[in-house]
Image: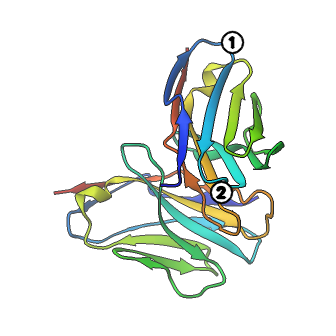
Amino acid sequence: AQTVTQSQPEMSVQEAETVTLSCTYDTSESDYYLFWYKQPPSRQMILVIRQEAYKQQNATENRFSVNFQKAAKSFSLKISDSQLGDAAMYFCAYRSAYETSGSRLTFGEGTQLTVNP
Amino acid sequence: DAGITQSPRHKVTETGTPVTLRCHQTENHRYMYWYRQDPGHGLRLIHYSYGVKDTDKGEVSDGYSVSRSKTEDFLLTLESATSSQTSVYFCAISPVYQETQYFGPGTRLLVL
């Protein structure tokens, strides 16, 4: 079974600065997808960014980018020019590319990000 | 907005009572999921569905059942609620040929 670990329960960053959230995962599969979801106080789960394991290029979405290290099974999220609205719980998630009828997500425990003005 | 609604959004109930949570989607997606969110655990899969009347268990399915009689509705039932089922429940959908899941707004359930 796959596992996802987020070793930083809490992080803080100053507004306009850059912060990196860590995620590691364990799998024996070679093809899979990785995601970062954001959960603000409203509780809504919002997709931030996704990465396909067979793509070597790191995904980027505006101020959000990832550092995907497949051999190290590491998938960190970098937030540049942090804004107050980035304050949220961030979850890393894994999905196998081999499940045809489930495509279930395995989540990490989450990292609570605080943005200080 | 993936057109997902959940009802009720909040519920307080007593131990031993049955509870049904509803997930409704407007875009006829084939795959639907129920997760629960607890501190220190992230989200964990309870049950999922890959079509009308086609469902399967996730990693934390004990004490829960599901039904899907229509494409748009996926019901989660707690047969006899226990305090350990106090949680936030999320429904999700996944469009066919897409790897991403989109989540509903969540239901906060308190079992006293």
Amino acid under disc 1? Gly
Decide if residue B41 is on the left or right side of residue A80: right
Q: Quadrant of residue B34?
A: top right
Question: Residue B82, image x and y in percent?
Answer: 66, 19
Decide if residue B7 is on the left or right side of residue A95: left
Amino acid under disc 2? Leu
Between B109 and A76, the one lying in front of the other is B109
Q: Distance between the Cα atoms at labels 1 and 2?
A: 30 Å
Between A1 and B49, the one lying in front of the other is B49
Q: Is residue B100 above or below residue B26?
A: below
Q: Which residue is mark 1?
A: B16
Quarter of the figure with the N terminus of chain A: bottom right
Residue pictured at 69% horizontal, 72% vertical: A32
Q: Is residue A108 visible?
A: no
Residue pictured at 57% horizontal, 15% vertical: B13
Q: Is residue A28 above or below residue A84?
A: below
Subunit ID for the residue under disc 2: A
Do callouts 1 and 2 mark residues in contact (Cβ within 8 Å)?
A: no
Question: Residue B45, image x and y in percent?
Answer: 68, 46
Q: Which residue is mark 2?
A: A105
Residue A8's label in the rendered image is none
Residue pictured at 61% horizontal, 41% vertical: B24
Question: Residue A69, image x and y in percent?
Answer: 57, 80
Decide if residue A73 is on the left or right side of residue A37: right
Residue pictured at 69% horizontal, 12% vertical: B16
How many discs mark residues in the rendered view? 2
| Circle 2 crowding by C-alpha within 10 Å: few under 14, some 14–19, many from 20 | many
User: Element at badge 2?
Assistant: strand
| Circle 1 crowding by C-alpha within 10 Å: few under 14, some 14–19, many from 20 | some
Quarter of the figure with the C terminus of chain A: bottom left
